[in-house]
């Protein structure tokens, strides 16, 4: 796997416990490589997300799950850049 040049985490061999983690990692890297955001923007979002978790009272934190924070950070940069939109158009009628 070739990673974005500015990606400094897990460059040698990323490890994932679940398939969704691999996909979230790949999506974050691919969106950056295709120019939808700078990798540094994603890194800052991830640092901010983890920081919020660390500052939260222990009783409200939940268990540490790195890729849960990864997904929250990914959602943040996707939302900030308007990469996903919802459509209100209804699906075509498939009944003939």
Image: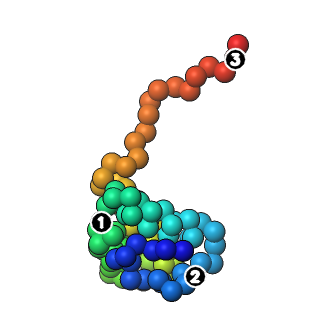
Q: Tell me: 59 left or right of 54.
A: right
Q: Quadrant of the C terminus?
A: top right
The residue sitting at 43% across, 39% down in the picture is 86
Tell me the distance, in whole angstroms, between the alpha carbons under discs 1 and 3. 45 Å
Secondary structure of the residue carrying tag 1 is loop
Q: For mark 1, does the 10 Å Cα neighbourhood hold few (<14), some (14 to 19), or many (20 or more) residues?
A: some
| Mark toward the start of the polypeptide (1 vs 3) | 1
Which corner quadrant of the image does residue 42 belong to?
bottom left
Secondary structure of the residue carrying tag 3 is loop
Location of mark 1 (residue)? 38
| Mark toward the start of the polypeptide (2 vs 1) | 2
Which corner quadrant of the image does residue 14 belong to?
bottom right
The residue sitting at 51% across, 86% down in the picture is 12
The residue sitting at 45% across, 63% down in the picture is 30
Q: Are marks 3 and 2 in contact (CB under 8 Å)?
A: no
Residue 52 drawn at (x, y percent): 33, 75
Task: Tell me if I can see residue 82 in this picture.
Answer: yes
Q: Tell me: 91 left or right of 69.
A: right
Q: Nearer the viewer, residue 96 or 50?
A: 96
25 vs 92: above or below: below
Location of mark 2 (residue)? 15
Q: How many marks?
A: 3
Q: Nearer the viewer, residue 72 or 10?
A: 10
Q: Tell me: 39 left or right of 11.
A: left
Residue 11 drawn at (x, y percent): 47, 83
């Amino acid at each position: 796997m070739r990673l974005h040049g500015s990606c400094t985490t897990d460059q040698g061999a990323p490890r994932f416990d679940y398939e969704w983690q691999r996909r979230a990692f790949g999506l974050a890297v691919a969106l950056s490589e295709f120019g939808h955001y700078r990798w540094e923007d994603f890194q800052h979002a991830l640092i901010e997300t983890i920081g919020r978790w660390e500052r939260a009272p222990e009783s409200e934190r939940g268990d540490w799950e790195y890729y849960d924070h990864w997904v929250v950070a990914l959602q943040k940069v996707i939302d900030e850049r308007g990469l996903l939109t919802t459509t209100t158009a209804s699906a075509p009628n498939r009944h003939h």
